Image: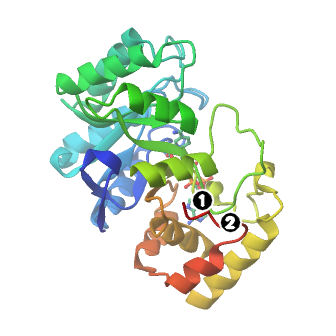
Amino acid sequence: MKTVILGTSGASVSQMGLGAMFMGTRTERTLSLALLDRYLAAGGSFIDTANIYAAWVSGFRGGESEELLGEWMRQRHNRSRLFLATKVGFGYPGVEQGLKAAQIEAECEKSLKRLAIDTIDLYYAHVDDRTTGQEESLEAFRRLVGSGKVRFVGASNFRAWRLAEAQGLARTWGGYCCVQQRHTYLRPRPGASFGPQISADDELLDYCRARGVTLLAYSPLLGGAYTRADRPLPEQYRGADSEERLARLAKLAREVGATENQVVLAWMMRSRPAVIPVMAASTVEQLTENLGALELALTPEEIEFLEVGPKEPSW
Ligand SMILES: NC(=O)c1ccc[n+]([C@@H]2O[C@H](COP(=O)([O-])OP(=O)(O)OC[C@H]3O[C@@H](n4cnc5c(N)ncnc54)[C@H](OP(=O)(O)O)[C@@H]3O)[C@@H](O)[C@H]2O)c1
């Protein structure tokens, strides 16, 4: 798998990330380990988790995904080959939602312990906190970087202006090097809500492009909705151009002999601003299909064909 530079960090990371959200909970242990092994065998090393994964699955409390990753790294002795991302900010049993300095520092210690590692490669603010000054949160992240517990920090579920504001405050040390947002080929209807999840909008894409901030795209496959009859499209994606986009996606997939999932991932990896899809799978077959996108080199004409709607102005 090729590597790309992660935003303003300068670090090289895999061009496709693997989400570990349900590993150790909904996706049972042995299967989770097999998925991780399969991704690593394909040359991938960029793994995404969070302190809360997956507290909302019945019978679990959060932290299971990090623990499973810790177990896998212990068994395989592969820590040095990986680039591990985890997050802080959403509430889960015993922990309130927020980005106060004390929360960030305490949750970082817990994540390090569950993962059984000394340093987190990428530590995200998982959700914006409008009740805590950004100065306080950023200062806590800066201290974690200074102490060597964290290498780089990122933001997730932030509006573009909040990210730009944060970057102004963190000018001396770099601040958030990348942003993780909901993003796929279909575009949500203007004003559509995903609760606390924020979809990458035109403002954010423009900001990322202008400032060299990489976009990490979560839920890139819409949970399988592009190809599965049992998985309806989330209604937020029933926008003015969705039928046109779905038709173009299906046509191109047929022409290049790929699945729609593969075309979406391949399109993303050719996007500007730089986009790294963070996909997940719950079977080895799904993961193998998704990794197949790495072999799909879409031409500029094919990328152009997928563009629907008004083009970005050239500034
Ligand atoms: N920052 C945030 O707020 C945030 C939010 C959400 C996710 N994330 C991160 O992003 C990662 C990915 O998110 P996601 O799970 O929503 O992404 P996704 O890649 O859109 O969806 C993954 C799900 O889609 C189905 N799927 C995957 N490949 C398939 C294939 N080839 N054919 C058919 N179905 C397929 C599977 O569903 P089934 O399991 O039902 O089979 C799989 O679990 C997470 O693991 C997490 O690390 C971050």
Q: Could you say which is closer to the camera, residue 162 or residue 254?
A: 162
In the rendering, at what x and y percent does residue 184 appear? 61, 58
Quick check: is the Cβ at mark 2 less than 8 Å away from ligand 1?
Answer: no
In the rendering, at what x and y percent does residue 139 appear? 32, 18
Give me the C-alpha separation between circle 1 and circle 2: 7 Å
- Secondary structure of the residue carrying tag 2 is loop
Asked whether the viewer can see residue 158, the reply is: no
For label 1, the residue is: 221
For label 2, the residue is: 226
Q: Could you say which is closer to the camera, residue 166 or residue 98?
A: 166
Asked whether the viewer can see residue 262, the reply is: yes
Residue at the spot 18% in from the left edge and 49% down from the top edge:
78
In the rendering, at what x and y percent does residue 299 appear? 49, 85
- Secondary structure of the residue carrying tag 1 is loop
Residue at the spot 38% in from the left edge and 12% down from the top edge:
101
With 128 as the anchor, is 67 left or right in this view?
left
Q: Looking at the image, is 93 positioned above or below residue 24?
A: above
With 21 as the anchor, is 72 left or right in this view?
left
Q: Earlier in the sequence, mark 1 or mark 2?
A: 1
Residue at the spot 70% in from the left edge and 33% down from the top edge:
195
Asked whether disc 1 touches disc 2, contact meaning CB atoms under 8 Å apart, the reply is yes
Q: Could you say which is closer to the camera, residue 312 or residue 60?
A: 312
Q: Amino acid at mark 1?
A: Leu
Number of the label disc, if any, that sits on residue 247? none
Q: Could you say which is closer to the camera, residue 278 or residue 138?
A: 138
In the rendering, at what x and y percent does residue 96 appear? 53, 12
With 171 as the anchor, is 288 left or right in this view?
right
Residue at the spot 56% in from the left edge and 85% down from the top edge:
301
Quarter of image, res 223: bottom right
Quarter of image, res 237: bottom right
